[in-house]
Amino acid sequence: MKQADEMLVDYMQKLKGEDVLVITRAVQLNLLGQVFRPIFAGKVSDIQLGHLTLSPVIIKMVNAPFYEFPLPLSIPLEQIVAFSTEIPSDMAFPLT
């Protein structure tokens, strides 16, 4: 019988190349001195046991809701609290 993590990876393999919105388990994050909520949108470029990689990835910040991070971003699977393929990455929504 497969472990839950392996089942999640198998499911997410089907999302490779798809746009997803990912919310992680943190109240806020800090990157290069910029504090933001843990909401990311991007194309699934890789999925491995333990992490999901988005590239290109948009970090949804209050003052820059469409900031495209210049590098692929890997997110540990255990830190993902929610994800959706139903919300377009270019959709604007309130973050406050």
Image (spheres, rainbow, N blue to C red):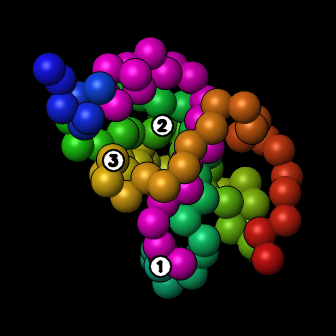
Tell me the element at label 2.
strand
9 lies above or below 66 = above
Mark found first going from the N terminus, 1 or 2: 1
Q: What residue is pinned by disc 1?
A: 30
Query: Which residue range is magenta in the image?
Result: 8-29
Q: What residue is pinned by disc 3?
A: 77
Residue at image position (60%, 75%) is: 36
37 relative to 2 in the view: left or right: right
Q: Which mark is residue 11?
A: none
- Label 3, residues with CA under 10 Å away: few <14, some 14-19, many ≥20: some
20 relative to 61 in the view: left or right: left
Q: What residue is pinned by disc 2?
A: 55
> Which residue occupies the foreground of this view, 75 or 8?
8
Q: Is residue 48 visible?
A: no
Tell me the element at label 1.
strand
CA separation in Å, label 1 and label 2:
19 Å
Measured from the top left, where is residue 60 in percent x and y?
Answer: 67, 60
